Image: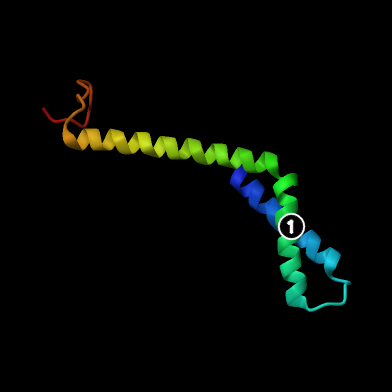
Amino acid sequence: MSAAVKYTLGRIGLFVVVVLALWPVDMNVFLKLMLALAFSAAASFFLLRGWRDEMAEEMALAAERRRAEKERLRSALAGDDQPDQADPHREG
């Protein structure tokens, strides 16, 4: 399972836990949801640090791969790269 999915499910889980904890409290439902959102966000900052860092690392690696592929394609379109002699798609 990817780190982004784990982190997202963790955030949702924390929100649900806080909502359930606030459910018996006598207050407006909208206020309960807003408090649950705020408390779960604060809790996730501390409790889900590892998954957040893992997700950030995965995103940084994906961005680097995209950047490298973009540069490779720009180079190929500009004619800067040397085609492989064993390229089966090359006519010649």
| Rendering quarter of residue 17 | bottom right
Q: Is residue 86 left or right of residue 66?
A: left
User: Residue most toward the left?
Assistant: 92
Res 71 seen here: yes
- What amino acid is at disc 1? Ser
Identity of the residue drawn at 19% across and 37% down = 77
Figure quadrant of the C terminus? top left
Question: Quarter of the image holding residue 12?
Answer: bottom right
**19 relative to 41 in the view: left or right:** right
Point out residue 56 in the picture as x, y percentages from the top left corner.
56, 41
Q: Position of residue 60 (x, y in %)?
A: 50, 38
Residue shown at 22%/33% (left/top)? 76
Q: Nearer the viewer, residue 40 or 72?
A: 40
Tell me the residue that label 1 is attached to: 40
Q: Looking at the figure, which quarter contains the N terminus?
A: top right
> Which structural element holds mark 1?
helix
Q: Residue at x 23, y 26 (%)?
A: 87
For residue 80, above or below residue 4: above
Measured from the top left, where is residue 19 in percent x and y? 79, 65
Q: Residue furthest top?
A: 85
